[in-house]
Amino acid sequence: MGEDRNDFDTEFGPTNVEIHAVSTAVELGDAGLALEVAKHVDASGLSPERQSRFLLDVARAHAQRRHVGEATAALMEAETLAPEQIHDHHLAREVIRDLIQLLDPRVPESLRNLAERSAVI
């Protein structure tokens, strides 16, 4: 197709393919590849929900690398775009829980508040 399209709300095109590449890399535990691909993705033309899911995968990749600040920032941005995607998604809760465990007992207030909004703590 060569371009992003949204026929019948499918949000299909090169950007969505790249987002799937990030997600797949994270699932396979290759955070380095996920973050490298994510650097070149501009998801701003997609729906807030799709952008939020992309940012959740970016947060997961950062968490795999123990980049707590970057993971938290990605989660906060994702929450701004689509709060329900972060508050209700099991992968988001898992990342939040992992970040809290990494930081315990010095969990930043922003992450603690996100955990409360997501019913993690």
Image (spheres, grey):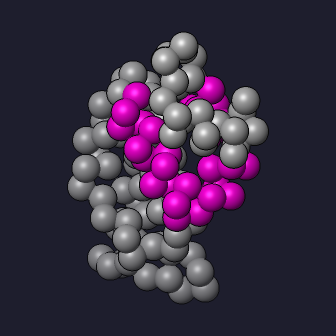
- The answer to whether residue 24 of the structure is visible from this angle is no
Can you tell which quarter of the image residue 68 is in?
A: top left
Q: What residue do we see at 54% from left, 14% from top?
A: 104
Magenta span includes 83? yes
**Magenta part mainly helix, strand or loop?**
helix
Check the picture and name the quadrant holding the N terminus: bottom left
Image x and y of residue 7, in percent: 54, 86
Q: Which residues are magenta?
A: 68-97
Q: What residue do we see at 41% from left, 60% from top?
A: 17
Lateral position of residue 88 relative to residue 92, left or right: right
Q: Is residue 59 above or below residue 86?
A: above
Q: What residue do we see at 68% from left, 58% from top?
A: 84
Can you tell which quarter of the image residue 61 is in?
A: top left
Looking at the picture, tell me which residue is in the foreground, 11 or 73: 73
Looking at the picture, tell me which residue is in the foreground, 52 or 5: 52
Image x and y of residue 97, in percent: 62, 26
Image x and y of residue 117, in percent: 69, 45
